[in-house]
Amino acid sequence: MSQQVAIICTDIKEAVLRAVGNHPSSDIFILTDDNTLNFCYPLIGDLSCLKEAHLITIPSGDENKNIDSVVKIWRYLSENGANRKSLMINLGGGMVTDIGGFVASTFKRGIDYINISTTLLGAVDAASGGKTGINFLGYKNEIGVFNLPRAVLIYTDFFKTLDIENIRSGFAEMIKHALIYSKEEWQKVSTFDLEKVNFDVLRTLVESSIHIKEWVVKQDPTEQNVRKVLNLGHTFGHAFETFSYRFNRPVLHGYAVMWGLLCELYLSHMKFGFPQEYLLKLKNLTKAYYGMFSFNCKDYEVLYELMTHDKKNESEDINFTLLSDIGDFQINQTASKEEIFEVLDFYLSL
Ligand code: GLY
């Protein structure tokens, strides 16, 4: 697996031309969902290098990140002459880049693919790092492989079409990256105005955020050890997210991550003395921009149960990544049921 470096571009046409121009094949398959077909594809569709490209469109929504969509794309590739040298371009958010990466990684034992992320969440998380996959039997990302894209292109002007909730959702992963990396990064990210977004500033923050992710992935591409740091906030976060779907009040992934970060920094404080001042700042950010997830103490058992089923667990214990301080992470940590309930008590007290 070679290491790719995401390209943050100001001219998407030129970036695609460069990325595709470097590829030995002119046999190109572009995957979009119905939204990116309408709003993003027109920005690159008239490029001469894409004139002959095949277009494959799947319905948007995470519920379509499934084996039926995979079969549909595999079938299209087979019936339209795709070969080992073909190139796939995945144009979309995390759903499109996850499934497109998976299809490309498995078709004829693997063809090259490029991700062009059209959402902030996708740009700072799913598009980079080579995790590909689909949901299966109700489990998220149950089937998949690690396989890095040939290139990742990020065009931040796409983000101007997102609503503020989707900007904040993506930004939560950037807050996570800052927390695992350095106080300097935290300072920049935690003072960013999520009320009136300055897209030029956002662009520079996205750039450093992706570099943090790449710095982690480079050390441990298949998540044997240090890559687990990227799971910070995600043990509680996934429980909140699944809970929200189970009880029919779905929340965006990044919102659940933000609430998860708050819980896991409190757990970090309990177990490793993580400084209170940062915890307080995170609480203020959460309340100002994300609101709080509503549940009560009768829900603790369900939330705990969801955490015991987290696929990050390697034994009976629930696995956490915690912090002693910003930039000072502790992977493979566990917590007792009492400690987890204490964290939930803390959350409800805010
Ligand atoms: N989303 C976390 C990772 O890519 O490892």
Image: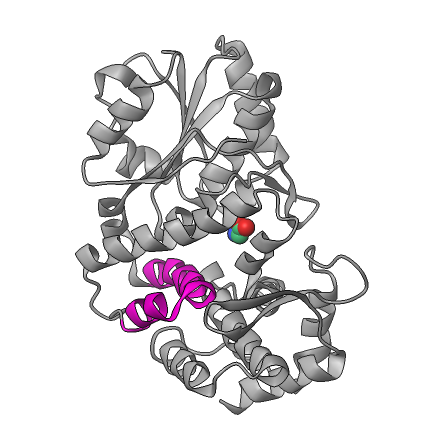
Q: Is residue 180 magenta?
A: yes
In the current view of this chain or complex, which residue is farthest to the bottom? Answer: 349
Against 289, is 36 above or below?
A: above
Residue depicted at 32% across the width and 12% down the height: 52
Residue 111's place in the image compared with 133, above or below, is above
Q: Name the residue: 37% across, 61% down.
A: 171
| x and y, in percent, of residue 257 in the image | 50, 65
Give whichever of 217, 58 is nearer the camera.
217
Q: Relative to 28, does residue 120 appear above or below in the rendering?
A: below
Is residue 345 visible in the rendered image? The answer is yes
Residue 43 seen by the camera: no
Q: Position of residue 252 (x, y in %)?
A: 46, 61
Residue 283 x, y percent position in the rendering: 43, 82
Q: Which residue is found at the position 80% from the left and 60% from the top?
A: 315
Magenta span dominant secondary structure: helix
Q: Whole-percent x and y of residue 207?
A: 31, 50
The quarter holding residue 313 reads: bottom right
Q: Which residues are magenta?
A: 165-191
Q: Going by the image, does 140 lie left or right of 183?
A: right
The image quadrant of residue 64 is: top right
Q: Which residue is drawn at the image coordinates 60% and 70% (left, top)?
A: 236
Relative to residue 119, is residue 134 drawn left or right? right
- 335 on left or right of 186: right
Quick one: quadrant of the N terminus?
top right
